[in-house]
Amino acid sequence: MMKIAVLLLAILQLCAINAFGQGIDLLTKNATRGNAEAQFELGTKYATGDGVKTDKQKAIYWMRKSAEQDNAEAQYNMGLIYHDGLGVSPDQEQAFAWTKKSAENGFAKSQYNIGVSYAKGYGVSKNIKQAIYWYKKSAAQGHIDAQYNLGLLYYAGKGVPVDKKKAFAWFEKSAQQGSSDGQYNLGSMYAAGNGVEHDGDQALAWYRKSANQGNSTAEFVVGNIYFSGHGVPVDKKKGIYWLQKSAEQGNDGAEYGLGMLYYIGNGVTIDKKKALYWIKKSAAKNNSDAQLVLGLLYLTGDGLAADKKQAKIWISRSAAKGNDNAKAALIKYHLTP
């Protein structure tokens, strides 16, 4: 019985291999006969090594064949190939041309990319009106980044009149689809009553959605909300948790805030070593408050060796960024030339 089962398994495996090979052969025949879908699929298989040996040139050959027959997704891929230089020399004009063909054929990703090209001047002269035109086409098909970008443009009044309500509406569409930046901006608009009626609960809810996706700015804001008890009961444990997450992602405000909490022992045990670690990280990112504090720590030798030269460097950097307390410190401690 066991031998029969093993033999049956071997036969099934052999049949599967033969069928798979025949599948590639049939796909190649159909592609050679000019079937655009087969050409696209074959190009994809050569690009990914799915059932065939990876071959960039064959991938490009078949993808181009399909694109030349107006396959919108193949045209989109040709745009990416030329944009990123995948098997060809990078060529932004070619990238734009193929992506535009795809966009005109209604492919949402291409419409978004064309919008970005017009906004940034990639392979074409900058044209914010055209950027908005293509963003709208893409956004209408539910493209999350196109929706978010439209929100930014309406918020700032770039290429369109400032319209906070429209900005809110587009941010909301992107946020509901999971855009962490859209969720953060929605939270900010609810918090400020900007384009929508102020609603602290909604603000925190959207900030939290964004923070839960790892948006470091949202994590920083949520941390501050819990730590200060702004609209919620004070919860320093939650505040520290979110500030720590934000700081670990490199948010300079969170790094500075966490450093100061360790320095004064607010919500955590005083730890000068940790305080200095976070303050230094923040100062290196040009946070002027962190630069001032680091300079003062060098000046007093608190937690590190006193060094007046380093004190002057860091306080001067803070002052150069417009920090009035740093400007006053340069005078008070005779650190000016």
Image (tube, grey):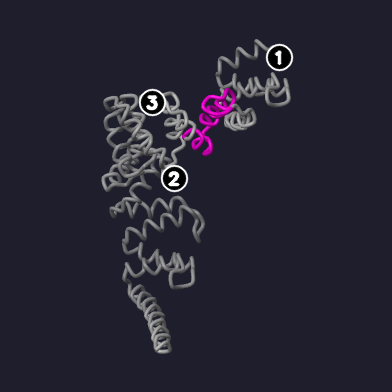
As measured in the structure, the alpha-carbon distance from the residue carrying label 3 to the one carrying label 2 is 49 Å
Q: Secondary structure at mark 3?
A: loop
Check disc 3 and report the residue beneath it: 233
Mark 2 or mark 1: which is in front?
Answer: 1
- The quadrant of the image that shows the N terminus is bottom left
- Whichever of callouts 2 and 1 sits on the residue coming sooner in the sequence is 2
| 249 drawn magenta | yes
Q: Amino acid at mark 2?
A: Tyr
Disc 2, disc 1: CB below 8 Å?
Answer: no
The x, y position of residue 83, in whole percent, is: 46, 52
Check disc 1 and report the residue beneath it: 337
Neighbour tally class for label 1: few under 14, some 14-19, many 20 plus, Cα within 10 Å? few
Residue 52, relative to residue 335: is it above or below? Answer: below
Disc 3, disc 2: CB below 8 Å?
Answer: no
Given residues 39 and 147, the one toward you in this image is 147
Neighbour tally class for label 2: few under 14, some 14-19, many 20 plus, Cα within 10 Å? some
| 272 drawn magenta | no
Residue 21, relative to residue 127: is it above or below? Answer: below
| Magenta region, residue range | 242-269
